[in-house]
Amino acid sequence: MQKSVIVLGRLSSSQWAELEQHFHVLELTKPLNLTQPEVLAALSQAHGIIGSGLAITPQLLDAAPNLKAIATVSVGYDNIPVDELTQLGIMLCNTPDVLTETTADTGFALIMATARRVVELAEWVKAGKWQTSIGPALFGSDVYGKTLGMVGFGRIGQAVARRGALGFGMQVLYSNASPKPALEKELGAQRRELNELLTEADFVCVTVPLTASTEHLIGADEFALMKPSGILINIARGKVIDENALIHALNNNVIQAAGLDVFAQEPLSTDSPLPQMSNVVALPHIGSATHETRDAMAQRAVDNIRLALQGERPISLVNEEVCR
């Protein structure tokens, strides 16, 4: 009997064709409406699910008794109940590596944009306010030669650090990570406790995963340790930062600016003051949003689901216990 795969989201025509060579493929829309008979019928037959932003609820799992693998088109999986999937023998696959460099590009773009006030001054020009040479009130800050503090030093954190150290002569500090002697040698990086890093860094770039221990990792006490000229960059998850504390710090000159690609609530609420603040660069979670990278992520997910349902080990398996 041919196995069935549900697709939630976009795949290229070649990726669709690849899946259809091996499986019965059905496209459904997000979010899944579990009250619709056709959705329940599809889930009852599904052996695999592939997509991004997957809401894996107990109700969905109850409706999919044949489910063997889920391939999320993302690196993060903080919204997916991994332990429950493991108990049920369901493999969870993600897409690390393929988005490392483009997400690091986004992080460094935020560093440059906040330091040089790119968005603020571009809007100033659009508004017709450029009538004479700008004065000190509109000056930005240098990036070259400054201290870059990486909170988290995994693949993406290391990629951001390489851009800073090798391209901009930055001193790299890192925390919330195990010692990395090879990178310390390559980049001249130095390991610090978080409080020390916050005190020393000119730019604090957050790349840690969201877990129970990292939620609100950076709050009022941490902002108070940063330099008044300090700039916060968040390309991790929105809830790693206490947004209320961040807004207070920005409004009261505790820190200079923030560059944010992620938020506690996404899409960002229209009530949030952050996008309206002149010292904030707010992006709509575009870390991996390039044509090349999103296609590569989707392909990794296709490869993962194909291998998993053919009895082979997926390329990127989160809960390895399922295969033991």
Image (cartoon, helix red, strand yellow):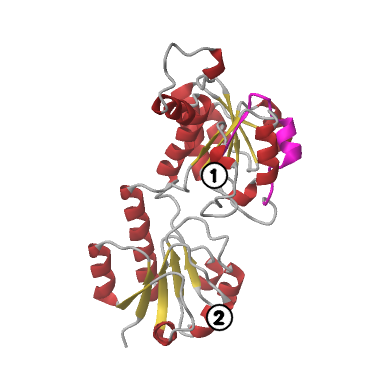
**Discs 1/2, front:** 2
Amino acid residing under circle 1: Gly
The vertical placement of 164 against 99, above or below, is above
Q: Position of residue 174 (x, y in %)?
A: 62, 35
- Residue ID at (43%, 50%): 97
Asked if the residue at tag 2 contacts the one at tag 1, i.e. Cβ–Cβ closer than 8 Å, the answer is no
The residue that mark 1 highlights is 154
The vertical placement of 87 against 214, above or below, is below
- Residue ID at (52%, 63%): 318
Tag 2 secondary structure: helix
Q: Which segment is the magenta one?
A: 215-235
Outermost residue on the right side: it is: 221
Q: Tell me if residue 233 is in the magenta stretch.
A: yes
Q: Position of residue 303 (x, y in %)?
A: 35, 64
Q: Which mark is residue 185?
A: none
Tag 1 secondary structure: loop
